Amino acid sequence: MKKRQRILITGCVQGVGFRPAVFKIAEALGLYGFVYNDTKGVTVELQGGEEKIAEFLVRLRGADKPPMAEIKSCETVDIAVVEDENQFIIKASDSEGAALSQVTADMIVCGDCLAEMGDKNDFRYGYPFINCTNCGPRYSIVKNIPYDRTNTTMTAFEMCEKCAAQYTDVTDRRFHAQPVACGKCGPKIWLTDNKGKEVKTQTDEVITEAARLLLDGKIVAIKGIGGFHLAVNALDEKAVKRLRERKRRDHKPFAMMACSIEKIKQYADVSELAEKELRSPQCPIVLLPKKDNSDIAESVAGGVNTYGFMLCYAPLHYLLFDKDIEVLVMTSGNMSDEPLICRNSLALERLGTVADAFLMHDREIYRQVDDSIVHIVDGRPVLLRRARGYVPTPIVTGKKCGQDIFAAGGDLKNTFCFTKQNQLICSEHIGDLEDAEVYHHYIGSIEHLGRLFEIEPKITVCDLHPGYLSTQYASSLPEARIIKVQHHWAHIASVLVEHELEGPVIGLSADGTGYGTDGAIWGCECLVASLDDFERFGHLAYYPLAGGDKASKEAIRPLVGLLKQTYGSDFETDKFRWLFERIEPDGIKKAQVISGQIERQINTVETSSLGRVFDAVAAMVGLGSYNHFEAQLPMALEAIIASGVEEHYDFELVKGGGKPLKIDLTKMVKQLISDIQEGEGSGIISAKFHNTIAVALLEMAKKARESKKLETAALSGGVFCNRYLTNRLIKLLKKSDFSVLFNRDVPSNDGGISLGQAAIAVNLVNRKQ
Ligand SMILES: [Zn+2]
Ligand SMILES: [Zn+2]
C-alpha cells in the first residue's frame, strides 16, 4: 500500500554525509520525497510502499548509516500522500531557518580513502590529503558559515575536473565534501631544515626522508590536522631526551602514535573498551597501563603508570608509518604551555630550536585543535581533554533555552561554552589563561565559535573567583547580564546536565582550588546540589595554605599547613626536620619561613583543597617536592600504589554545630608519618592514603543520604582524574546502594566547568520565564 511518512531524525546527523546517504537508500528502494537539514536535525519525507519505507529505516539505522553519524531519535508520522511526485531530492535547507550546526568535528581518514590511497590505479594514490564526506578535516579549516568550500581554507585550491565531478555528483562519496582534492589540484607537502630551507618537495621523497630522519633520532615537526606535532622515535632514549631538553621545562608525559592496535599492544595493556576508543572516529589519545619491560624510551612517560597512545589519523601519518616506523612520540608543537602552533612561519620561528626538520604542508589550519585524551574509569571511557574529533559537536539536551548564553569557564584547563536553543556548544580545550598567548587565543576562539553558531549572548556566566581572568573577561562584556557560579557547584552541574537531570543529588566535588562563597579556597566538597541551588553539606576541614600561586607548585607549603593543623600548638618545625630535609636539602629553612607566614597570616588562605593534600603526601613519601605541571605529584603518587592493599588510615567526620560536616584528617597524618618513620613501603602508604580518601568521601555521602533522603551521588572535579581513587570510590558507593553519576562527555577536571556554568544559567533563565 502506498503511503507517505515524515521522519524527524535527531543526533549527530548534519555535516556527516547524512543527506546523501538518505538519498542513496531512497533511490535504491524507489521511494520518492525529499530530505533537508533543519534546526532539530534532519527531516525526511518518504513516499512509497509501506514495506519499502520500513526497510529504508532499517538500512538507515544499520548498514547504510554514514560512519560519523549518530542517530539519537527517529520520529515518524503518517501524512497525506502527494500526487505527481516522481523523484527523491535533497533540499538545501528548511525554509524556516538554517540548520543549527553546520560545522562538524575533524574526522580521521576513513577506510575507503585509505584503500584508495594505497591503490596504484587510483588517481589519489599516495596522496596525503585524501578525504571524502565520511572523513577529513572540518572544524580546523572553517573560517565562517555557511559551511562551503569558499568559507574554508581550501578556497585557496581550485578543484580539477576529476575532483569537481565527484564533488557535484550526489551519488559520489565526495558529494559536497568541502576539502576534496587530489595531487593535481590540492595541497602539497614538503620538507625543510630548521631554517625553513626546502630539502625535498616530491611527495614520496619528502615522506621517505622524514622517516629516515626520525629513524636516525632526529626531531621532526609534522604539520597535521589541528596543528604541528613534534615527533621523535619513541624507542630512542637519546632522541626523546633531546626533545625534552629542547622543549624546555616540559616534564609532562609525551603522547605516542602507532599505526596498529597490535603495535600498541606490544607496549601497553589494551582492554576491549580501550581498543574501541582507540579505533573510534574521534581517534583520541587513550591512556593505557604500561607493560613491564617495554622498549619505549624511559623519558617518554616517567613518573606515571600509563602510556598515552593514539592511532594514525591523517593520511600523512599512514604514509609516514609505512616507511618502517614503529612508534613515534607525537607531542604538541608548542613551547611549554603556549597554544598549539598551526602556522608554518610561526612553527619555524618558535620551533626552529627544537626540531631538526619540518614536514610542512600548504593546507592552512584556521583553528588549532589539540588531540583529545580519554581514559577508562569504572569500565567507561571518560574524556580528560575534549578537543579534536569532539569539538564543536554540541551536547544536546531535552530543554530548550530561549536566550543565547556564554559561559566563560575557569582559568585552568579552560574551555568555554555557548548555549543555543537545546544545544550546549563547548569549545575545544583552550589551556591555562595565565599565559598571555593562551588568553589571547581564548578571546579569539570565543569570537570564532560565536560566529560559526551565530550566537549573540545577552547572558554571561562565569566563576565566582574575582581574580580569574575568565571572570574579568566576562565582566568586561557590554550589555551582558552576569551570573556568577561557585566552582564546585559548576562541576556537579556538569554531571547533572550530561545525564539530563536537574537534581538535587549528593555532589562530591574534589579538586585543587575553587573560590568559595565564604572567601576561602574550597577543594573537597560535599554539595547537596541541583541546577537551582546548592547547600554545602560537608567539606575537608580547613588547613592554612601560604604562598598564593606557589602553593600549588611547592608541596612543602600544604605540608606545613597540614602539620600545623594536625599538631596545633605542639607543632615545631624542628621536630620534623628529618621530614623536611627528606623532601628538599634546605627544606627545614623553607618550612620555618612558611610556618612564620602562616602564623602572621601573610599571603595565607584557609583551604579545603584535596589536590594539595595529595601533593603533601607525595612529597612525604619521597616522590619530589614540585609540580612542574598540574598534578605531577598526585599522578606520581597514584603510579606507585601497591596492589591488593585494603587498609586505610583513620579519620573523623566532625559535626560543626549548624555548620557543614568536616572530614578531619588529623589521625591520618599522624599515622602516615609514623608509617614513614617505621620504614613502611611508599606504595603501601600511597594505597592506604587513597583508600582513606575514598572511605571518607563515602562516609560523607552516607551522612548526606541520611539527612537529605537522596540516593544519587554525582562525582566531579580534577581529583577524580585519579583512576584508582575514582574506581574505588564508585565501587564503595555502589556497594552501599548509591546510584553513581560521573562525567561522560566533558572532563571531570576544570575543562568541564563551562558546561556546568551553562547548565545552571539555562535553568535560571527557563525558571524565570
Ligand atoms: Zn574518506
Ligand atoms: Zn583534483
Image (spheres, rainbow, N blue to C red):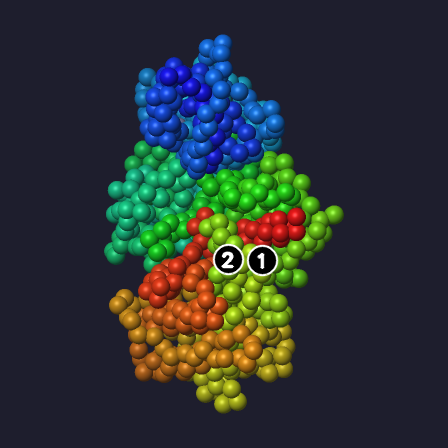
Task: Give the residue at the far right of this rendering.
Answer: 479
Please indicate whether residue 459 sits to the left or right of residue 300 in the image. right
Please indicate whether residue 484 sits to the left or right of residue 335 in the image. right
Q: How many marks?
A: 2
> Against 487, is 115 above or below?
above
Q: Residue at x 52, y 27 (%)?
A: 37
Q: Secondary structure at mark 1?
A: loop
Q: Residues within 10 Å of mark 2 (few under 14, many from 20)?
A: many
Disc 2 residue type (three-letter): Gly
Disc 1 residue type (three-letter): Asp
Quadrant of res 359: top left
Callout 1: CB less than 8 Å from ligand 1: no
Find residue 532 and name its label. Answer: 1
Please indicate whether residue 468 sits to the left or right of residue 258 in the image. right
Task: Give the residue at the far bottom of this rendering.
Answer: 570
**Mark 2 near mark 1, Cβ–Cβ under 8 Å?**
yes
User: Which one is nearer the viewer's eye here, 480 or 238?
Assistant: 480
Q: Quadrant of the N terminus?
A: top left
Callout 2: CB less than 8 Å from ligand 1: no
Which residue corresponds to mark 2?
503
Quadrant of res 314: top left
Q: Secondary structure at mark 2?
A: loop
Q: Residue at x 58, y 80 (%)?
A: 598
Q: Residue at x 32, y 33 (%)?
A: 322
Question: Can residue 249 be seen?
Answer: no
Quadrant of res 146: top right
Q: Position of residue 150 (x, y in %)?
A: 58, 24
User: Which one is nearer the viewer's eye here, 372 or 175?
Assistant: 175
> Against 479, is 91 above or below?
above
Question: Can residue 381 be seen?
Answer: yes
